Image (cartoon, coloured by chain):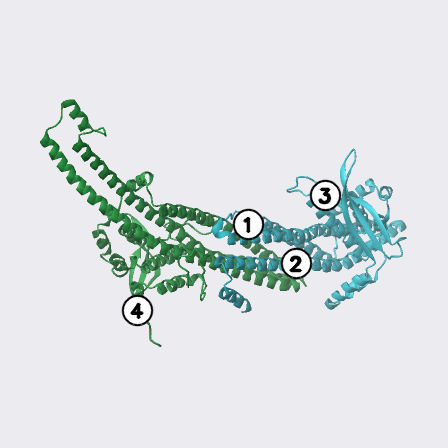
């Protein structure tokens, strides 16, 4: 896989294509290992299985949930004729993945954190159940969770995180370890970040553009998913009705002499045709999942933009605060009241304060100003550092996104082509049977 | 009734001879009929369509070698009812229905007229291919007379036709004593065939409906810039789906529909044959219960017995001919449908391939190789 980084018209050459649905995860492994993080050089990660468990939940009610088996294996080459070492395994449920992700979101606010597969099935076409315990849904979620882990493991920054490593290797005690990091305190209140959006005076233009792009991508993908689900529904109807041909041809063949055999075998092909849609749409779901991942990614991008706005806002507030204090000092020093202040008014009404009072106030202000300058310098540094690291990750993300979406579209097209081939085969066979009528 | 050579050959036909015979028919075909040029006629009382019927023939019974007349649907109805009257146990090809019940806004929309025109064309050609009906006097008049009205006035009137119906009802109430087994089997077949062909027709209509709904959803793919290549692909697929629907509507549906109507015709033929037999049986019984021999009645009964035999032979001969025709017609319609579907998938595959290539923004030789490799495998 190659990509011209930095150019907007990226050219991708498709390498060895093994893009069957079951191997799509392998493909991700291939591309990520090539990029190579220390973690992935050390270990292979798999979400191998899913299992139903029942237990008591936090309000002491019986509940059924699914757990997923995470396998990790040292990534060493196996000698010829040798068997690979048995993997280390542990079980995790979805809520633990969520906890991990929240931790990452808070700890690395300048990174676009890979999304988790959806909690509840959305954009489903009617045949697919929206039930969380449905085996097909569970299977797709398993793939999605594995994908999440691999994305984190292949990220240059996230892959080095201790908590992430322990998530993969320590079944018990991990939960306590995460909570001990105290990340929940660092989480910015939503209100704060909401208000920041409306009051930032000088947002970085690049982030504004990024936010718009992310919103647009979100809209496009949502629409694509919606239409795809409806089209899938309709296509299902078309294929299934052909099954009726199978039944009727079979019944009709019973009363015909010369036509009987031809009709009967044509009917079988119609049955084959009708049932082929199930596999086809199953494969399409994987494609839809790839799109959904990027739909959820847009939320992560928006989070980073919002965090930037928050920091920018805080910087502006700090700068504003500093400017205000400096002005106060100036007024105090020169005695002019340019800005209305209660102190100024009361001194006008009730007489000037004493020299000592003034000097002590000046000293306090000086102190405050110094602190303010420190704060602004810190905030400025924080902001610049954020912008630098965020932008690095954004560039990386853009490359990844272009590559992945292009591959998704291509594998979708290839899947459609294979569907066409099946169609050609069935109808050619049917034609042969009709010829024998 | 003239026994044309081909109707006798019917009974000795083998599978391999079928093709040969079709070739023979093509070579020996001596009458060519087309129905075209529908034109609207407006009078004070009504509006109707007139079709041009063009005949080219080398038959000696015809004074000229070419005829052009204008006929309306009513005229076709007249012809068919005359043919059925004169040959009650021959299978006369059905006409398109008078009105279409569902989804018709206006009687004379273009699609309706064209569908009807094609069916009328087929009707006349089917008659012209029939070894017996083709030589009917009424058929000749239909093709040649400039004015049909005067000819329509002749023939059994309304009252006599009423009488026939009454007799038929009376006979059906009494029931048949001795229906020959082969006609019982035929009756059973007709019932089953009617059910099956109606089912196939319904399934086909349903498929068209589902395809249309699929097409509607496909058109919802309104894709902006980053996915323009996909959008073009979807456009192409939509076009192909439209063509597929059109093909079904123009080839398979009319063929199936024709044979749905044929099934009804067959039922009527079986009824008429039964009536002829019933009439004979009734008179025969009356004869048997008369002690003094009645010469007149005896002659009548003999006449009716002959009538039964002629009717049965006519039906037997026409039956195998009809079956062959049905097989040929439906086989060709199904094959055509299968071919169209193969064509559809081939074109859609190409559109998908183009979309994949446009997504890579350059023709990826490896991708193409992979796809074509699969093809070779």
SS at mark 4? Answer: loop
Q: Nearer the viewer, mark 3 or mark 2?
A: 2
On the rendered image, what quadrant is the N terminus of chain A found in? bottom left
Q: Which residue is mark 2?
A: B336
Q: Residues within 10 Å of mark 2 (few under 14, many from 20)?
A: some
- Give the chain ID for the cyan colour: B
Label 2 vs label 4: CA separation?
Answer: 58 Å
Q: Which chain is mark 2 on?
A: B
- For chain A, the rendered hue is green
- Circle nearer the N terminus (3, 1): 3
Q: Which chain is mark 3 on?
A: B
Q: Is residue A165 left or right of residue A215?
A: left
Label 3 vs label 1: CA separation?
Answer: 31 Å
Q: Which residue is mark 3?
A: B98
The answer to whether residue A402 is above or below residue B220 is below
Label 3 vs label 2: CA separation?
Answer: 28 Å
Label 4 vs label 1: CA separation?
Answer: 49 Å
Evaluate if marks 4 and 1 touch, with contact meaning CB atoms under 8 Å apart: no
Q: Quadrant of residue B4?
A: bottom right
Residue A86: assigned label: 4
Image coords of residue A22 (percent x, y): 42, 62
Evaluate if marks 3 and 1 touch, with contact meaning CB atoms under 8 Å apart: no
């Amino acid at each position: 896989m190659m990509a011209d980084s930095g150019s907007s018209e990226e050219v991708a050459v498709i390498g060895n294509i093994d893009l069957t649905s079951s191997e799509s995860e392998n493909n991700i492994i291939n591309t990520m290992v090539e990029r190579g993080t220390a973690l992935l050089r050390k270990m292979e990660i798999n979400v191998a299985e899913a299992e139903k468990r029942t237990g008591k939940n936090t309000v002491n009610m019986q509940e059924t949930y699914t757990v997923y088996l995470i396998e990790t294996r040292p990534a060493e080459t196996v000698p010829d004729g040798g068997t690979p070492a048995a993997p280390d395994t542990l079980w995790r449920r979805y809520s633990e993945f969520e906890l991990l992700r929240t931790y990452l979101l808070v700890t690395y606010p300048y990174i676009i954190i890979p999304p988790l597969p959806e909690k509840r099935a959305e954009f489903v076409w009617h045949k697919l159940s929206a039930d969380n315990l449905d085996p097909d849904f569970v299977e797709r979620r398993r793939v999605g969770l594995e994908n999440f882990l691999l994305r984190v493991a292949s990220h240059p920054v996230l892959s080095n995180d201790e908590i992430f490593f322990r998530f993969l290797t320590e079944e018990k005690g991990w939960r306590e370890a995460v909570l001990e990091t105290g990340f929940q305190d660092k989480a910015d209140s939503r209100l704060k970040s909401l208000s920041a959006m409306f009051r930032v005076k000088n947002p970085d233009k690049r982030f504004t553009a990024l936010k718009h792009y992310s919103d647009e991508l979100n809209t496009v993908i949502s629409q694509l998913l919606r239409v795809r689900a409806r089209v899938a529904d309709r296509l299902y109807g078309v294929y299934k009705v052909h099954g009726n041909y199978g039944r009727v041809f079979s019944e009709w063949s019973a009363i015909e002499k010369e036509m009987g055999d031809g009709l009967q075998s044509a009917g079988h092909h119609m049955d084959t045709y009708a049932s082929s849609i199930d596999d086809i749409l199953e494969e399409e779901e994987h494609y839809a999942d790839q799109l959904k991942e990027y739909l959820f990614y847009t939320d992560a991008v928006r989070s980073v933009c919002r965090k930037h706005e928050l920091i920018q806002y805080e910087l502006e507030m700090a700068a504003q605060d500093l400017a205000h204090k400096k002005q106060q000092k100036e007024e105090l020093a020169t005695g002019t009241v340019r800005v209305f202040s209660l102190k100024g008014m009361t001194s006008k009404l009730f007489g000037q304060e004493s020299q000592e009072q003034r000097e002590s106030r000046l000293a306090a202000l000086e102190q405050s100003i110094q602190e303010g300058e420190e704060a602004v310098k810190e905030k400025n540094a924080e902001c610049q550092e954020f912008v630098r690291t965020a932008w690095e990750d954004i560039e990386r993300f853009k490359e990844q996104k272009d590559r992945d979406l292009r591959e998704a579209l291509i594998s979708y097209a290839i899947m459609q082509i294979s569907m066409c081939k099946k169609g050609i085969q069935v109808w050619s066979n049917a034609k042969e049977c009709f010829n024998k009528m | 009734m003239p026994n044309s050579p081909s109707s006798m050959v019917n009974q000795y036909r083998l599978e391999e001879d079928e093709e040969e015979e079709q070739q023979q028919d093509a070579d020996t075909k001596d009458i060519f009929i087309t129905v075209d040029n529908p034109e609207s006629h407006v009078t004070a009382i009504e509006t109707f369509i007139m079709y041009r019927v063009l005949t080219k023939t080398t038959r000696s019974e015809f004074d000229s070698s070419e005829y052009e007349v204008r006929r309306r649907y009513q005229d076709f109805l007249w012809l068919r009812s005359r043919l059925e009257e004169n040959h009650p146990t021959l299978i006369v090809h059905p006409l398109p229905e008078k009105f279409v019940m569902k989804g018709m806004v206006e009687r004379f929309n273009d699609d309706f007229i064209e569908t009807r025109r094609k069916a009328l064309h087929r009707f006349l050609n089917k008659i012209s291919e029939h070894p017996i009906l083709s030589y009917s006097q009424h058929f000749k008049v239909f093709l040649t007379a400039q004015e049909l009205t005067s000819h329509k006035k002749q023939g059994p009137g309304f009252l006599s036709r009423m009488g026939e119906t009454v007799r038929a009802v009376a006979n059906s109430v009494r029931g048949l004593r001795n229906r020959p087994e082969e006609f019982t089997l035929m009756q059973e077949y007709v019932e089953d065939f009617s059910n099956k062909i109606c089912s196939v027709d319904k399934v086909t209509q349903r498929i068209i409906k589902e395809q249309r709904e699929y097409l509607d959803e496909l058109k919802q793919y309104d894709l902006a810039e980053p996915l323009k290549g996909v959008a073009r692909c979807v456009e192409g697929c939509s076009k192909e789906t439209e063509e597929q629907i059109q093909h079904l509507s123009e080839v398979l549906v009319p063929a199936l529909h024709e044979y749905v109507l044929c099934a009804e015709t067959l039922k009527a033929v079986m009824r008429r044959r039964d009536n002829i037999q019933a009439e004979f049986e009734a008179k025969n019984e009356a004869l048997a219960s008369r002690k003094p021999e009645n010469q007149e009645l005896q002659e009548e009964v003999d006449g009716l017995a002959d009538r039964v035999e002629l009717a049965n032979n006519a039906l037997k001969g026409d039956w195998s001919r009809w079956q062959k025709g049905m097989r040929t017609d439906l086989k060709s319609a199904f094959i055509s449908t299968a071919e169209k579907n193969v064509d559809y998938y081939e074109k859609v595959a190409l559109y998908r391939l183009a979309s994949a290539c446009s997504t890579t923004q350059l023709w990826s030789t490896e991708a193409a190789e992979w796809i074509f490799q699969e093809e070779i495998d």
